[in-house]
Image (tube, grey):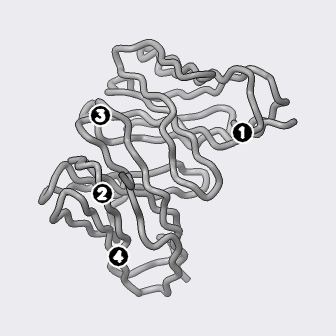
């Protein structure tokens, strides 16, 4: 098992550019989520999905889109990057409804100039 | 809205000391509470998970307690080692179990 994988590890964007952060898990987990981590603010939930074809917004969804066409993949799209989206992005997955621990990917560091 | 606070924000101790990290939360309607470890530039590793019906969990030198009614959890680390140096995060899961609210973490440094 590779667990939760994220690509790229690091990315630099210019304001207004778009990009997709990739997340994949090979544990057949139903639930996946995206968080961003900023200094002094902890991790905040952006979007989550409880299964293929089902997504919902978290605490800070503006400027981000997600889709879940398969159980394995949960990409996060930045539509028009802004400097405020400079952050470290973590993807996580979990088997059920909170009975087990969440598994986190290694993160993607994004710098928007 | 759930808010999670961790005190202290940073802690430096000599090797061998026993130490306690604190986590408090404002809404006691939680599903569970987890403690994570994060090394610089790395992802999060789950250390302990306490269900809302439990009082404590232990793993090796780590012991986490939960007092849901008072909105508090502690992470006790026995006989600290330099390899324990990291940031420790606590997170509470909503009643739906799958939304985590994180604290801002305690940065621990264990010195030789």
Label 3 environment density (alpha carbons within 10 Å; few <14, some 14–19, many ≥20): many
Name the residue nearer the viewer: B76 or A60: B76
Disc 2 to disc 3, C-alpha distance = 16 Å
The percent coordinates of residue B31 (x first, y second) are 32, 27
**Which percent across, then down, holds residue B110?**
78, 36
The residue that appears at 60% across and 51% down in the rendered structure is A40
Give the position of the C terminus of chain A as an image quadrant.
Answer: bottom right
Q: List the residue tagged with mark 3.
A: A98
Q: Nearer the viewer, mark 2 or mark 3?
A: 3
The residue identified by callout 4 is A20
Q: Nearer the viewer, mark 1 or mark 2?
A: 1
Q: Are marks 2 and 3 on the same chain?
A: yes
Q: Chain of mark 3?
A: A
Number of residues whose C-alpha sits closer than 10 Å to that of mark 2, classed few (under 14), some (14–19) or many (20 or more): many
The mark nearer the N terminus, 2 or 3, is: 2
Mark identifier at residue B83:
1
Mark 1–mark 2 Cα distance, whole angstroms, equals 33 Å
Q: Is residue B72 above or below residue A51?
A: above
Badge 4 marks a residue whose secondary structure is strand
Mark 4 to mark 2: distance in Å?
14 Å
Query: On the same chain: label 1 and label 4?
Result: no
Query: Callout 2: residue from which chain?
Result: A
Q: Quick check: do tags 1 and 2 share a chain? A: no
Image quadrant assignment for residue B21: top right
């Amino acid at each position: 098992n590779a667990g939760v994988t994220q690509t790229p590890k690091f990315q630099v964007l210019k304001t207004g550019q778009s990009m997709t952060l990739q997340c994949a898990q090979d544990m057949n987990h139903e639930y996946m989520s995206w968080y961003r981590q900023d200094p002094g603010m902890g991790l905040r939930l952006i979007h989550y999905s409880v299964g293929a074809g089902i997504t919902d917004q978290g605490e800070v969804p503006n400027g981000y889109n997600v889709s879940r066409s398969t159980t394995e993949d949960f990409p996060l799209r930045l539509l028009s990057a802004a400097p405020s989206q400079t952050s470290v992005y973590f993807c996580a997955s979990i088997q059920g409804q909170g009975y087990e621990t969440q598994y986190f990917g290694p993160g993607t560091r994004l710098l928007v100039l | 809205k759930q808010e999670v606070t961790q005190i202290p924000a940073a802690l430096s101790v000599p090797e061998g000391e026993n130490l306690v990290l604190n986590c408090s939360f404002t809404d006691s309607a939680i599903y569970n509470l987890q403690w994570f470890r994060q090394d610089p530039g790395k992802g999060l590793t789950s250390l302990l998970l306490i269900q809302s019906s439990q009082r404590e969990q232990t793993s090796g030198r780590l012991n986490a307690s939960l007092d849901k009614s008072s909105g508090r959890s502690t992470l006790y680390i026995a006989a600290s080692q330099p390899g324990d140096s990291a940031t420790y995060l606590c997170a509470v899961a909503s009643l739906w179990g799958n939304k985590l609210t994180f604290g801002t973490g305690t940065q621990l440094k264990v010195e030789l």
